[in-house]
């Protein structure tokens, strides 16, 4: 299975929401099923940028998260775009098995079974027209 990844960065400190202040590695998924006029990450949303999204296996994403975190368990935030349009279940299972915590930020248009494996799910309903 291949994930479309716009960027992976960190660790940095989560700057908003319920996890503010938490050391976090961000995995920003490429692609979204909405177009919000106030989006601050169009490079991860609009398909015109898809040439810059890296097709990565869950193993490759996991290796990058481990490298960035120095193999120290912390929070991994799945954002985007809309990470719910992809299957992050295997990545979450692998990380949780060694003590990493997982959060996901989505507008809530799609529910996934792997949501139940998250430590934190942030739903930000967006009043916009679906693509």
Image (tube, helix red, strand yellow):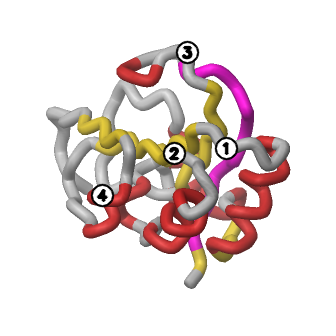
The residue at which mark 3 appears reads as 21
Report the magenta residues as a range: 3-14
Circle 3 sits in a helix, a strand or a loop, which is it? loop
Contact? badges 1 and 2 (CB < 8 Å): yes
On the rendered structure, is 92 left or right of 70? left
Q: Nearer the viewer, residue 63 or 27?
A: 63
Q: Nearer the viewer, residue 91 or 40?
A: 91
Residue nearest the observer in this picture, 127 or 17:
17
Which residue is labeled 2 in the image?
A: 101
How packed mark 1 is, by other alpha carbons closer than 10 Å (few <14, some 14-19, many 20 or more), is: some
Quadrant position of the N terminus in the picture: bottom right
Which residue is under mark 4? 115
Query: Magenta stretch: dominant SS?
Result: strand
| Picture quadrant of residue 63 | bottom right
Q: Is residue 2 magenta?
A: no
Mark 3: few, some, or many residues within 10 Å (few <14, many ≥20)? few
């Amino acid at each position: 299975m291949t994930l479309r990844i716009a960027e992976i960065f960190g660790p940095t400190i989560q700057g908003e929401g319920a996890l503010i202040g938490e050391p976090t590695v961000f995995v920003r998924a490429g692609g979204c099923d909405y177009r919000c006029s106030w989006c601050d990450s169009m490079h991860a949303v609009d398909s015109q940028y898809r040439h810059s999204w890296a097709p990565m296996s869950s193993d490759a994403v996991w290796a990058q998260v481990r490298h960035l975190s120095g193999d120290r368990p912390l929070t991994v935030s799945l954002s985007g775009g809309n990470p719910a349009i992809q299957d992050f279940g295997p990545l979450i299972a692998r990380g949780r098995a060694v003590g990493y915590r997982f959060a996901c930020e989505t507008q809530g248009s799609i529910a996934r079974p792997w949501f139940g494996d998250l430590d934190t799910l942030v739903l930000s309903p967006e009043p916009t027209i679906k693509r």
